[in-house]
Amino acid sequence: MCVPLAALVPAVLLAAPPQASAATAPSGLWNFSVASGSNKVPDIDGSAQNLTLKGEWSTGLGYVNFNNAPSYGTTSRANFSPGDLEFAFGAVIRTTKVAPGTNPNVIQGGLGNDAAQFKIALQPVSGGTAVCVLKGTKANLLFKSSVTGLANGGWHEIVCSRQATSVSISVDGRVNSYALSPGTIKLATGRQLLVAGKGSTTTYADQVIGSFGCAGMLTGPGALTALGAKMPC
């Protein structure tokens, strides 16, 4: 089971990753235009890993609806851990429902009981608020966007990132950033990347009920700028 987001302590300190080496973790970009009769969301960039759609989902014009728990998308291999590199990950979503007592997972690597986890989730406060969770060596962070009212049926772009001197969460271009402290944090989950839910569980609390138009993750120096140039897919 995932650790409840309320149990994680917001903070502004996170270890600065070394930036001398090139990215070793793969990247991906998924436009949720699904061919008729297929359950694959093609990776149009990076590692060429498709997302496989599972559970109760349906398609619209250029998007996928996740209708009930469990419904989710998952990559084929467990190699999206950013380690100690810069990264940016996020999605373009719409929803009308973030129910009290739930924390729907938009995109994630790792589960709450793992030694490492990174994810974007929604909280029901203020009509839907996006948060980023980064859990690894020497840090366990939750930081949130100042943008509220996300469960309004409109499309919203949400991106979480780590740079050399900061972490940030961006919603529809509004950025909230937090400074980093010296040291090392390594985000190595050893799990497949997930969107819209945490897998085959029927636990509704972590399930997004809504639509995805785009999702992506880039790793390495300049990841945030590079992802910003590619989204919304």
Image (cartoon, grey):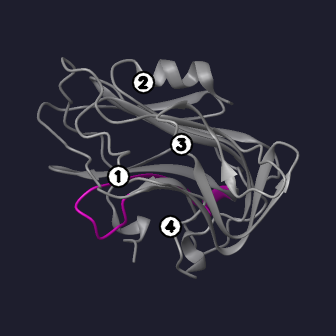
Which residue has dot 3 on it? 145
Dot placed on the residue nearer the N-terminal end, 1 or 4: 1
Q: Secondary structure at mark 3?
A: loop
For the residues labelled 1 and 4, the Cα–Cα distance comes to 22 Å
Q: Amino acid at mark 3?
A: Ser
Where in the figure is residue 44, as x and y percent of width and height? Answer: 61, 32
Above or below, comparing residue 75 to residue 22 in the picture: below
Where in the figure is residue 181, as x and y percent of width and height? Answer: 18, 32
Q: Secondary structure at mark 2?
A: helix
Which residue has dot 4 on it? 198
Q: Residue at x 42, y 65 (%)?
A: 5
Where in the figure is residue 38, as x and y percent of width and height? Answer: 75, 56
Q: Residue at x 13, y 30 (%)?
A: 182
For the residues labelled 1 and 3, the Cα–Cα distance comes to 12 Å
Which residue has dot 1 on it? 10
Displayed quadrant of residue 84: top left
Residue, far front: 37
Whether the magenta-drawn stretch holds residue 230 is answered as no
Which residue has dot 2 on it? 223
